[in-house]
Image (tube, rainbow, N blue to C red):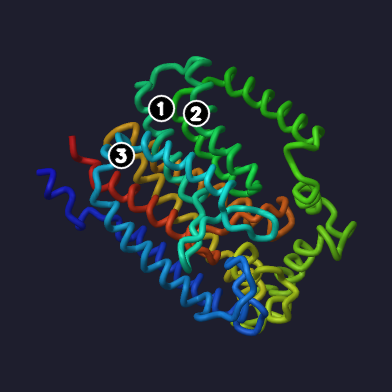
Amino acid sequence: MTRRFLSFRDFDWPLLGMVLVLCTISVFEIYSATLHTKYAAYDYYAGSIHLKQMGFHTKQIFWISGGLVAMFFFSKIDYHKLIDFVPWAYGVSLLALVAVKLVGHKVLGARRWISMGPVHFQPSEWVKLILILIVARYFANLGGRNLTWRDIFKSLLLVGVPMVLVLVQPDLGTALTYLPILVAGLFLGGINIRQALVLLVCATVLIVGAWSSGKVLKPYQKARLTSFINPDNDPKGTGYQLRQSLIAVGSGGVWGKGMAKGTQTQGDFLPIPHADFIFAAFGEEHGFVGALLVLLLYFFILMRLIQNAQTAADLSGSLIIMGLVAVLTFQIAVNVGMVIGFMPVTGIPLPLMSYGGSSVLFTFLALGVAMNVRMRRFVN
């Protein structure tokens, strides 16, 4: 009976189809965004300036292909076994984050990668999957009972320790993506309104204190977080990225300028158009209609995942999928909000669109675990 239910007939093929459509759009946009720019000749993420061996779009195809293989592999592994194993993985991930700080590959003043030959491994991206699993394990083991302050404090430590290790790299953007995992776990785990309000007040006090102390956030991070309010105050400095992004999106109009015809993108005005600002590049070339179609595609993917969470066989399965939904929703909202000037520039990639191996592989691995939850929804 179990073997029959775990056949690929129960695989969520519509979800995979939407993901592949998004990945195809990503490859074409990365190709277009780097066609006539300096990024076509230089690899920003390699840590040193060198001539390319292959195009970014070709590298993205390799990452997507590897992600697909990993997704199918993880979809066949019982997620309960992953949950049983995750405490060990959590310990290894903490060691990896410490190793990044000590011997990590330095790029633009930050240590975020560990070099493994020609490949640069970013542990902080993979930690998101481990946190999704360990948070799901933690709250599922509580059995759905009312949360005590001790339960909440333990969950804060689970997420807070790796978050601090990532903050000191420094990598504010990735560290922030850990928060929605915790919020989803607390919400589904049974936190009440009074406890939520107390946490909100405490978080506000901590944020204000961290901002005022000058020891938690570096000056350039503060400048990036506030420049979106009025980018014209420093148009050639902290406001440059946002101004160019707004110009690119606005100049795209309704239908866009066409593939590889965006003046802001092809003229090297838009920074990192194949990664952090890929949505701005896409908006310039394909206009409001193209951007709206991409957002609708994200919406349908998220709704499909939520549907799978509702049909999960147990609480741990629901928590896993909703943890993924929380991360993806946060990244989409922050990246798109950043591009149109509603959010600070934090360097958070757009899932399955932005160039980057670690981000792509994390998403596919997490989708593989979510697929396994769906495939086991009728297994007792």
Q: Which quadrant holds the C terminus?
A: top left
Does the residue at mark 2 contact the one at mark 1 (Cβ under 8 Å)?
Answer: yes
Q: Which mark is residue 17?
A: none
User: Which mark sits nearer the N-terminus, 2 or 1?
Assistant: 1
Q: Identify the residue at horizontal 57%, vertical 38% (top origin).
A: 163
Q: Nearer the viewer, mark 2 or mark 3?
A: 2
Residue 268, image x, y percentages:
72, 77
Amino acid under disc 2: Leu
46 and 338: which one is in front?
46
- Looking at this rendering, what residue extends furthest in the left direction? 1
Residue 146, image x, y percentages:
44, 16
Q: Is residue 349 above or below residue 210?
A: below
Q: Nearer the viewer, mark 3 or mark 1?
A: 1
Q: Identify the residue at horizontal 46%, vertical 61% (top origin).
A: 116
Residue 105, image x, y percentages:
58, 58
Q: What's the distance in space between the residues labelled 2 and 3, CA to CA? A: 18 Å
User: Which mark sits nearer the N-terminus, 3 or 1?
Assistant: 1
Q: Which mark is residue 312?
A: 3
Amino acid under disc 1: Phe
Q: Label 2: which residue? A: 186
Q: Secondary structure at mark 2?
A: helix
Q: What's the distance in space between the residues labelled 3 and 1, CA to CA? A: 15 Å
Callout 3 crowding tier (Cα within 10 Å): few <14, some 14–19, many ≥20: many
Q: Is residue 255 visible?
A: no
Residue 52, image x, y percentages:
56, 80
Q: What's the distance in space between the residues labelled 2 and 1, CA to CA? A: 8 Å
Q: Label 1: which residue? A: 139
Does the residue at mark 2 contact the one at mark 3 (Cβ under 8 Å)?
Answer: no
195 and 99: which one is in front?
99
Q: Is residue 4 above or below residue 314?
A: below
